[in-house]
Amino acid sequence: MVAAVQEELRKIAVQPNGRVPRHVAIIMDGNGRWAKERGLPRSEGHRQGTENLRRIFECAVEIGIEILTIYAFSTENWSRPPGEVQMLLRILETVIDRELTTLHKNGVQLRHIGRLEGIGSRLQRKIRQAMEMTRDNHRLIVNIAFNYGGRDEIVNAVQRIVREGIPADEVNEALLSHYMYTSDLPDPDLIIRTSGELRVSNFLIWQGAYAEYYATSTYWPDFDETELHKAVAEYGRRKRRYGKTDEQIE
Ligand code: FPP
Protein backbone atom coordinates (compact mmCIF):
# COMPACT_ATOMS: atom_id res chain seq x y z
CA MET A 1 0.00 0.00 0.00
CA VAL A 2 1.23 3.50 -0.81
CA ALA A 3 2.86 5.04 2.26
CA ALA A 4 0.67 8.17 2.21
CA VAL A 5 -2.52 6.10 2.24
CA GLN A 6 -1.14 3.99 5.03
CA GLU A 7 -0.32 7.10 7.04
CA GLU A 8 -3.81 8.47 6.47
CA LEU A 9 -5.40 5.21 7.60
CA ARG A 10 -3.20 5.17 10.67
CA LYS A 11 -4.43 8.65 11.59
CA ILE A 12 -8.05 7.54 11.18
CA ALA A 13 -7.41 4.47 13.29
CA VAL A 14 -6.14 6.38 16.29
CA GLN A 15 -8.82 9.06 16.17
CA PRO A 16 -10.76 10.48 17.85
CA ASN A 17 -9.31 9.56 21.22
CA GLY A 18 -6.13 7.77 20.22
CA ARG A 19 -7.02 4.50 21.88
CA VAL A 20 -5.49 1.47 20.26
CA PRO A 21 -6.62 -1.93 21.53
CA ARG A 22 -3.77 -3.84 23.14
CA HIS A 23 -5.38 -7.20 22.52
CA VAL A 24 -7.46 -7.92 19.43
CA ALA A 25 -9.15 -11.28 18.87
CA ILE A 26 -10.57 -12.38 15.54
CA ILE A 27 -13.19 -14.94 14.51
CA MET A 28 -11.99 -15.52 10.95
CA ASP A 29 -15.29 -16.51 9.37
CA GLY A 30 -16.47 -16.78 5.77
CA ASN A 31 -13.68 -18.73 4.06
CA GLY A 32 -16.19 -21.26 2.70
CA ARG A 33 -18.60 -18.64 1.33
CA TRP A 34 -15.72 -16.66 -0.15
CA ALA A 35 -14.71 -19.77 -2.11
CA LYS A 36 -18.26 -20.78 -3.05
CA GLU A 37 -19.01 -17.35 -4.53
CA ARG A 38 -16.01 -17.81 -6.79
CA GLY A 39 -16.86 -21.38 -7.77
CA LEU A 40 -13.82 -22.63 -5.88
CA PRO A 41 -13.46 -25.50 -3.38
CA ARG A 42 -13.71 -24.61 0.33
CA SER A 43 -10.03 -25.54 0.65
CA GLU A 44 -9.16 -22.54 -1.51
CA GLY A 45 -11.05 -20.29 0.91
CA HIS A 46 -9.02 -21.64 3.81
CA ARG A 47 -5.82 -21.23 1.80
CA GLN A 48 -6.61 -17.59 1.04
CA GLY A 49 -7.69 -17.07 4.63
CA THR A 50 -4.32 -18.34 5.80
CA GLU A 51 -2.46 -16.10 3.32
CA ASN A 52 -4.46 -13.18 4.66
CA LEU A 53 -2.83 -13.59 8.05
CA ARG A 54 0.46 -12.21 6.73
CA ARG A 55 -0.89 -8.75 6.01
CA ILE A 56 -2.98 -8.72 9.18
CA PHE A 57 0.04 -9.56 11.36
CA GLU A 58 2.07 -6.78 9.72
CA CYS A 59 -0.73 -4.28 9.99
CA ALA A 60 -1.35 -5.18 13.63
CA VAL A 61 2.27 -4.36 14.45
CA GLU A 62 2.03 -1.05 12.56
CA ILE A 63 -1.10 -0.06 14.47
CA GLY A 64 0.50 -0.90 17.79
CA ILE A 65 -1.62 -3.93 18.67
CA GLU A 66 0.38 -6.10 21.08
CA ILE A 67 -1.62 -9.31 21.10
CA LEU A 68 -3.63 -10.97 18.38
CA THR A 69 -5.75 -14.03 19.14
CA ILE A 70 -7.09 -15.89 16.11
CA TYR A 71 -9.76 -18.57 16.12
CA ALA A 72 -8.38 -21.19 13.75
CA PHE A 73 -10.13 -24.39 14.87
CA SER A 74 -12.84 -24.80 17.47
CA THR A 75 -13.65 -27.84 19.58
CA GLU A 76 -16.88 -27.95 17.54
CA ASN A 77 -15.05 -27.96 14.18
CA TRP A 78 -14.27 -31.69 14.65
CA SER A 79 -17.82 -32.31 13.42
CA ARG A 80 -17.02 -30.91 9.94
CA PRO A 81 -16.52 -33.43 7.11
CA PRO A 82 -13.34 -35.46 7.82
CA GLY A 83 -11.59 -34.12 4.72
CA GLU A 84 -12.02 -30.54 5.86
CA VAL A 85 -10.89 -31.37 9.41
CA GLN A 86 -7.74 -32.98 7.99
CA MET A 87 -7.16 -29.93 5.86
CA LEU A 88 -7.44 -27.51 8.77
CA LEU A 89 -5.04 -29.64 10.81
CA ARG A 90 -2.65 -29.69 7.86
CA ILE A 91 -2.85 -25.90 7.49
CA LEU A 92 -1.50 -25.36 10.99
CA GLU A 93 1.32 -27.80 10.34
CA THR A 94 2.15 -26.11 7.03
CA VAL A 95 2.10 -22.67 8.62
CA ILE A 96 4.59 -23.87 11.24
CA ASP A 97 6.78 -25.67 8.67
CA ARG A 98 6.87 -22.83 6.16
CA GLU A 99 6.44 -19.64 8.16
CA LEU A 100 8.04 -20.24 11.55
CA THR A 101 11.49 -18.90 10.63
CA THR A 102 10.04 -15.73 9.10
CA LEU A 103 7.62 -15.20 11.98
CA HIS A 104 10.50 -15.66 14.43
CA LYS A 105 12.71 -13.22 12.49
CA ASN A 106 9.85 -10.70 12.56
CA GLY A 107 9.60 -10.87 16.34
CA VAL A 108 6.33 -12.79 16.55
CA GLN A 109 5.76 -14.85 19.66
CA LEU A 110 3.56 -17.81 18.78
CA ARG A 111 1.34 -19.35 21.38
CA HIS A 112 -1.33 -21.98 21.30
CA ILE A 113 -4.55 -21.83 23.28
CA GLY A 114 -6.88 -24.81 23.45
CA ARG A 115 -6.46 -28.49 24.13
CA LEU A 116 -3.32 -30.06 22.77
CA GLU A 117 -4.77 -33.49 23.56
CA GLY A 118 -6.78 -34.63 20.57
CA ILE A 119 -4.29 -33.16 18.12
CA GLY A 120 -1.89 -35.69 16.54
CA SER A 121 1.44 -36.12 18.35
CA ARG A 122 3.56 -34.80 15.45
CA LEU A 123 1.56 -31.58 15.24
CA GLN A 124 1.60 -31.27 19.03
CA ARG A 125 5.39 -31.49 18.95
CA LYS A 126 5.62 -28.83 16.25
CA ILE A 127 3.32 -26.51 18.18
CA ARG A 128 5.46 -26.91 21.31
CA GLN A 129 8.66 -26.32 19.34
CA ALA A 130 7.21 -23.18 17.72
CA MET A 131 6.23 -21.80 21.12
CA GLU A 132 9.62 -22.63 22.59
CA MET A 133 11.52 -21.05 19.69
CA THR A 134 9.57 -17.78 19.75
CA ARG A 135 9.00 -17.40 23.49
CA ASP A 136 11.31 -14.39 23.89
CA ASN A 137 9.86 -12.40 20.98
CA HIS A 138 7.85 -9.35 21.91
CA ARG A 139 6.89 -7.48 18.75
CA LEU A 140 3.55 -9.25 18.49
CA ILE A 141 2.07 -12.10 20.50
CA VAL A 142 -0.06 -14.33 18.29
CA ASN A 143 -2.32 -16.75 20.13
CA ILE A 144 -3.59 -19.45 17.84
CA ALA A 145 -6.84 -20.82 19.22
CA PHE A 146 -6.76 -24.35 17.88
CA ASN A 147 -8.93 -27.13 19.25
CA TYR A 148 -10.23 -24.32 21.40
CA GLY A 149 -13.62 -23.89 23.04
CA GLY A 150 -14.49 -21.29 25.66
CA ARG A 151 -16.67 -23.61 27.73
CA ASP A 152 -14.05 -26.33 27.48
CA GLU A 153 -11.45 -23.84 28.74
CA ILE A 154 -13.60 -23.03 31.78
CA VAL A 155 -14.20 -26.73 32.49
CA ASN A 156 -10.46 -27.35 32.21
CA ALA A 157 -9.75 -24.49 34.65
CA VAL A 158 -12.30 -25.75 37.19
CA GLN A 159 -10.94 -29.31 36.96
CA ARG A 160 -7.42 -28.07 37.71
CA ILE A 161 -8.64 -25.93 40.61
CA VAL A 162 -10.50 -28.88 42.13
CA ARG A 163 -7.58 -31.27 41.55
CA GLU A 164 -5.24 -28.87 43.30
CA GLY A 165 -7.57 -28.87 46.31
CA ILE A 166 -8.11 -25.10 46.33
CA PRO A 167 -10.75 -24.27 48.98
CA ALA A 168 -14.08 -22.99 47.62
CA ASP A 169 -13.83 -19.63 49.37
CA GLU A 170 -10.51 -18.94 47.65
CA VAL A 171 -12.11 -19.29 44.22
CA ASN A 172 -12.78 -15.88 42.74
CA GLU A 173 -12.62 -14.20 39.33
CA ALA A 174 -8.91 -13.45 39.57
CA LEU A 175 -8.14 -17.06 40.46
CA LEU A 176 -10.22 -18.40 37.58
CA SER A 177 -8.52 -15.99 35.17
CA HIS A 178 -5.21 -17.37 36.37
CA TYR A 179 -6.29 -20.87 35.29
CA MET A 180 -7.33 -19.79 31.78
CA TYR A 181 -5.04 -20.33 28.77
CA THR A 182 -4.46 -16.58 28.61
CA SER A 183 -3.56 -16.22 32.29
CA ASP A 184 -0.60 -13.88 31.79
CA LEU A 185 -2.27 -11.71 29.14
CA PRO A 186 -4.76 -8.87 29.35
CA ASP A 187 -8.31 -9.69 28.27
CA PRO A 188 -9.18 -8.88 24.66
CA ASP A 189 -10.20 -5.26 24.15
CA LEU A 190 -11.72 -5.83 20.73
CA ILE A 191 -13.24 -8.98 19.23
CA ILE A 192 -13.78 -8.91 15.49
CA ARG A 193 -16.02 -11.31 13.59
CA THR A 194 -16.01 -11.36 9.82
CA SER A 195 -18.63 -12.58 7.32
CA GLY A 196 -21.70 -10.95 8.84
CA GLU A 197 -22.44 -13.53 11.52
CA LEU A 198 -23.38 -12.08 14.90
CA ARG A 199 -22.41 -14.91 17.22
CA VAL A 200 -19.77 -15.44 19.88
CA SER A 201 -19.39 -19.13 18.96
CA ASN A 202 -17.73 -20.20 22.20
CA PHE A 203 -14.77 -17.88 21.64
CA LEU A 204 -13.07 -16.34 24.68
CA ILE A 205 -16.34 -16.34 26.61
CA TRP A 206 -14.55 -15.75 29.92
CA GLN A 207 -11.99 -13.22 28.72
CA GLY A 208 -14.43 -11.40 26.42
CA ALA A 209 -16.78 -10.31 29.22
CA TYR A 210 -15.93 -6.62 28.67
CA ALA A 211 -14.55 -6.74 25.15
CA GLU A 212 -15.92 -4.45 22.47
CA TYR A 213 -17.43 -6.51 19.65
CA TYR A 214 -17.10 -5.54 16.00
CA ALA A 215 -18.78 -7.36 13.14
CA THR A 216 -18.29 -6.84 9.42
CA SER A 217 -19.94 -8.53 6.46
CA THR A 218 -16.54 -8.88 4.75
CA TYR A 219 -15.41 -12.49 4.38
CA TRP A 220 -12.14 -13.30 6.15
CA PRO A 221 -9.97 -13.68 3.00
CA ASP A 222 -10.98 -10.11 2.02
CA PHE A 223 -10.44 -8.62 5.47
CA ASP A 224 -7.43 -6.45 4.64
CA GLU A 225 -5.45 -3.63 6.27
CA THR A 226 -8.18 -1.08 5.58
CA GLU A 227 -10.72 -3.32 7.29
CA LEU A 228 -8.50 -3.72 10.34
CA HIS A 229 -7.97 0.04 10.55
CA LYS A 230 -11.75 0.54 10.31
CA ALA A 231 -12.35 -1.89 13.19
CA VAL A 232 -9.70 -0.20 15.32
CA ALA A 233 -11.16 3.23 14.52
CA GLU A 234 -14.59 2.02 15.58
CA TYR A 235 -13.07 0.70 18.78
CA GLY A 236 -11.58 4.14 19.39
CA ARG A 237 -15.05 5.67 19.24
CA ARG A 238 -16.58 3.28 21.76
CA LYS A 239 -17.00 4.23 25.38
CA ARG A 240 -15.96 1.42 27.68
CA ARG A 241 -17.99 1.84 30.81
CA TYR A 242 -17.43 -1.44 32.67
CA GLY A 243 -20.82 -1.02 34.33
CA LYS A 244 -20.25 2.62 35.30
CA THR A 245 -22.21 5.66 34.15
CA ASP A 246 -21.05 8.04 31.40
CA GLU A 247 -20.39 10.74 34.00
CA GLN A 248 -18.13 8.46 36.00
CA ILE A 249 -15.84 7.71 33.08
CA GLU A 250 -15.60 11.26 31.69
C1 FPP B 1 -14.40 -20.20 9.18
O1 FPP B 1 -14.79 -20.17 7.85
C2 FPP B 1 -13.00 -20.50 9.26
C3 FPP B 1 -12.46 -21.60 9.86
C4 FPP B 1 -13.24 -22.62 10.56
C5 FPP B 1 -11.03 -21.82 9.85
C6 FPP B 1 -10.18 -20.60 9.95
C7 FPP B 1 -8.84 -20.94 9.58
C8 FPP B 1 -8.01 -20.22 8.83
C9 FPP B 1 -8.29 -18.89 8.25
C10 FPP B 1 -6.70 -20.75 8.56
C11 FPP B 1 -5.68 -20.19 9.49
C12 FPP B 1 -5.23 -21.28 10.29
C13 FPP B 1 -4.12 -21.34 11.05
C14 FPP B 1 -3.87 -22.61 11.68
C15 FPP B 1 -3.17 -20.26 11.31
P1 FPP B 1 -15.91 -21.18 7.39
O2 FPP B 1 -15.24 -22.34 6.79
O3 FPP B 1 -16.81 -21.49 8.52
O4 FPP B 1 -16.64 -20.33 6.30
P2 FPP B 1 -18.18 -20.39 5.95
O5 FPP B 1 -18.93 -20.01 7.20
O6 FPP B 1 -18.30 -19.36 4.87
O7 FPP B 1 -18.46 -21.78 5.48
Image (cartoon, rainbow, N blue to C red):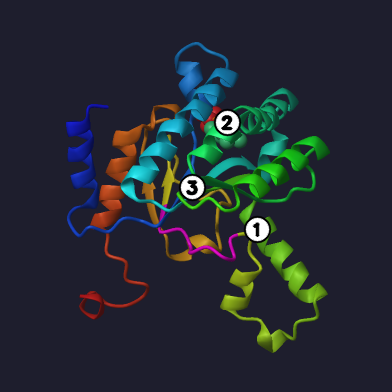
Query: Which secondary structure, mark 1?
Result: helix
> Residue at the bottom extreme?
169
Q: Nearer the viewer, mark 3 or mark 2?
A: 2
- Type of amino acid at the residue the image marks with label 2: Glu
Instruction: Verify CB contact (< 8 Å) between mark 3 and mark 2.
Output: no
* Of callouts 3 and 2, the N-terminal one: 2
Q: Residue 187: x, y in percent? A: 48, 63
Classify 10 Å Cα crowding around label 1: few (below 14), some (14-19), many (20 and above). Answer: some
Instruction: Verify CB contact (< 8 Å) between mark 2 and mark 1.
Output: no
For image coordinates 19% across by 53% down, the residue present is 15
- Type of amino acid at the residue the image marks with label 1: Arg
Q: Answer with left or right where residue 212 lies relative to residue 206.
A: left
- Is 2 situated above or below 185? above
For image coordinates 80% across by 80% down, the residue present is 165
Residue on which the image places disc 2 = 99
Q: Nearer the viewer, residue 46 or 120?
A: 120
Distance (Cα) linking label 2 and label 1: 31 Å
Classify 10 Å Cα crowding around label 2: few (below 14), some (14-19), many (20 and above). Answer: few
Classify residue 6 by image quadrant: top left
> Residue at the top extreme?
39
Distance (Cα) linking label 3 and label 2: 31 Å
In the image, the residue with mark 1 has its CB under 8 Å from the nearest atom of ligand 1? no
In the image, the residue with mark 3 has its CB under 8 Å from the nearest atom of ligand 1? no
Residue on which the image places disc 3 = 199
Segment tinted magenta in the rendering: 182-190
* Of callouts 2 and 1, the N-terminal one: 2
Q: Answer with left or right where residue 200 lies relative to residue 55.
A: right
Residue on which the image places disc 1 = 151
